Image (cartoon, rainbow, N blue to C red):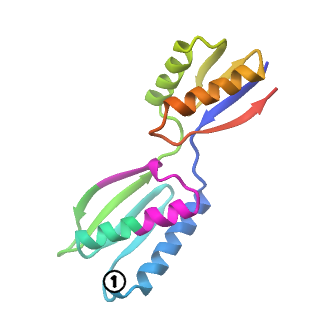
Amino acid sequence: MPSFDIVSEVDKQEVRNAVDQVNKEVSTRFDFKGSDARVEQADYVLTVYADTEFQLDQVQDILAQKLAKRSVDVKCLDIGSVEKVSGNKVKRSVTVKTGVETELAKKIVKCIKDSKLKVQASIQGDAVRVSGAKRDILQDTIALVRKTITDFPLQYQNFRD
C-alpha cells in the first residue's frame, strides 16, 4: 500500500554553518566594533547576545538572512523575548522547531479527513503517515496539505509504492 510521511526537519549542520557565518560577519562589521554581539548554539537553541536591543535586532536580521541562504526555512524559528543580562547587555533565545507538534498533526489529519480523499492519516510520534490505494491520490493529498498549511515548513518524505 503506497504511503508517505509528513515531517518537519531542519539540517543541524546548516544551522551551525549559518551561526558561524553570522559570527564572522558581526566580528568584521564596523557598526559592531567593540561590542559583544554574537550568536551561540546549543543543539537547536540559539542565543543572540548584543549590547543594545537595536543591535540585537540587527544580529537577528543577519541570522535570518544567513539561514535563508542555507535553505533553512525561517518560519521554523521560535523567537523568545528580550532579557537583560548584566549592565545594559541583552540577549534573546531563538528555538529552531523540529518535528510536527501534536496540535499541528491533528489539524493536518482533520484537513485530510474533511477532504473526502480515500486515504488514511495517522499520527506517529512527530510525523504524520498518510497511506492510500493509489499514488495519484497521495499526490493530491500532498497538494492539499501544501495549500492548507502555509504557516509551518513541512517536508514530504519516505514516499513508497
Residue at 79 percent of width and 29 percent of height: 160
Residue 155 % position (x, y): 61, 40
Residue at 63 percent of width and 29 percent of height: 142
Residue at 41 percent of width and 79 percent of height: 26
- In the rendered view of the protein, which quadrant contains the C terminus? top right
Q: Is residue 89 left or right of residue 33?
A: left
What residue does disc 1 label?
A: 32
| Residue extent of the magenta highlight | 62-80
Question: Callout 1: few (<14), some (14-19), or many (20+) C-alpha neighbours within 10 Å?
Answer: some
Label 1 is placed on what type of residue? Answer: Phe
**66 lies above or below 74:** below
- Where residue 135 sits, quadrant-wise, is top right
The extreme right residue here reads 161
Q: Which residue is more in the foreground, 11 or 67? A: 67
Give yes or no for residue 73 being in the magenta stretch.
yes
Q: Which residue is more in the foreground, 60 or 50? A: 60
Q: Which residue is more in the foreground, 67 or 99? A: 67
Residue at 35 percent of width and 53 percent of height: 79
**36 lies above or below 85:** below
Give yes or no for residue 93 being in the magenta stretch.
no
Residue 24 % position (x, y): 49, 80
SS at badge 1: helix
Q: Is residue 116 left or right of residue 93?
A: right
- In the rendered view of the protein, which quadrant contains the N terminus? top right
Residue 37 % position (x, y): 35, 77
- Where residue 54 sits, quadrant-wise, is bottom left
Residue 139 % position (x, y): 70, 27
Q: Is residue 8 left or right of residue 75?
A: right
